[in-house]
Image: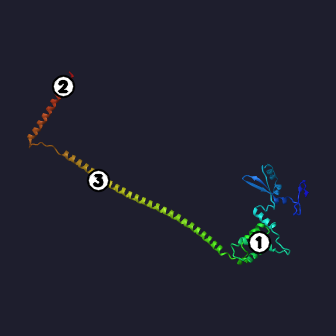
Amino acid sequence: MSKDDAGKVVVKATWAKNLPVLDDASRFVEITLPGGNRKVTYKPIHIVQNPHLLDKIRSAQTVDIIVYKYSSNVSNNTVHKAVVAQLFDKPGGKDRAGAASNQRLCEIQERLEEIHAHKYDAQNIHFTLWAMAIEKTAPKNPVDFEQCLHNPPPADLLHFFPVRETNHERALMREYKLAQNVNNAYGNFIQLDKNSFDQTQAALRCLNDSFEQAKRNREMLEATYHTRASLIEASVVDLQEAKKETEEGKRLAKAVRTLKDFDHPDVHENERAKENTNRHRGSTRRTKGRRRERLRSV
C-alpha cells in the first residue's frame, strides 16, 4: 500500500508486480454516460485525455461506473464461465516435464466427445488424438479456445471421424426438405402466373365478345341507315314526280275551254231556272230578317 502524488491510497494486488496506473484502471473500469436513446461508454484514460468529457460527467444526472473482475475482456457470462473454468476450476495443464497433463487431455477429450460424439462415429482413442492436437495449438484466449473445440477435426485426423449414418441421412433429409421448399415456391409462382394468365385470357375473351357485339351493332346500324336512305330517296322521287304531274295537270286544265252545250238546251234552261229560284229565296229571307230586326229595335 502506498500513496500517489495526489495523496490517494493506492493498493497493489497480491499477484501484481507493480502498483496500478491509469492504463491498468482503463482495463478494469468503464464509465457510462447517457447519450440520447443510448448510453455511451468511456474508459478512464479517454476521460483524462478529453477534458470536455469531465464536463459531461459533472452535468450528468446519473453516471454508471462498471468494474470488471477479470478486466474488460471478460464482459459477458460465456467468457466469464470459460475463464473461471480454465483458471480456477481446473489444475494446471502442464506436468513437471512441460508436457500436457493426462487430466488436461482427458478434460479436452470429454469436452470434444460431448460436442461431437453425436455427429462422428469415432473411437475414444481418436478423440484423444484430437485433444492432443488441440492442446498443441490451443489459443490462450478462452473464447478462441472454446471456438476451437467446436471446429471440425484437423485434416490429418479427418479420416478417423466418419459422419454417423443417421446424421448423414438427417442432413440429406434437411437438404431434400430445403429443395422441396424451394421447388414448392416455384410451384406457387407457377400457380400465380397461371391464375394471372387465366384472368387475362378471360378478360380478352370478354373484350373480344364486346368487339364482336359492337361489330354486329355497327352492321345493323349501317343496314338501317341504307334502308332508310333508300326509302327517303324513293319518297323524294315520288314527290317530285307527283309535283310534275300536278303542274302538268294544271297546265292542261288551263288549256281546256268551256263550250256551250247546243245538244241539250233544256237541261241548261232548267239549271238556270233553279239558280234564279235559289237567288230569289235567298233575297226574300234576307229581307224578312231585316224587317224583324227593325221591329225589335222599335
Label of residue 292 in the image: 2
250 left or right, relative to 262:
right
Q: Which of marks 1 and 2 is nearer the N terminus?
A: 1
Q: In which quadrant of the rendered image does the C terminus lie?
A: top left
- As measured in the structure, the alpha-carbon distance from the residue carrying label 1 to the one carrying label 3 is 118 Å
Is 237 situated above or below 107?
above
Label of residue 234 in the image: 3
Task: Tell me where residue 108 appears, x and y as whole percent.
Answer: 77, 72
- As measured in the structure, the alpha-carbon distance from the residue carrying label 2 to the one carrying label 3 is 63 Å
Task: Tell me where residue 229 appears, x and y as whole percent.
Answer: 33, 54
Q: In which quarter of the image is residue 269?
A: top left
Foreground label between 1 and 2: 1
Task: Tell me where residue 102 appears, x and y as whole percent.
Answer: 80, 74
Q: Quadrant of residue 293?
A: top left
Residue of label 1: 108
* Residue type beneath disc 1: Ile
* Residue type beneath disc 3: Ala
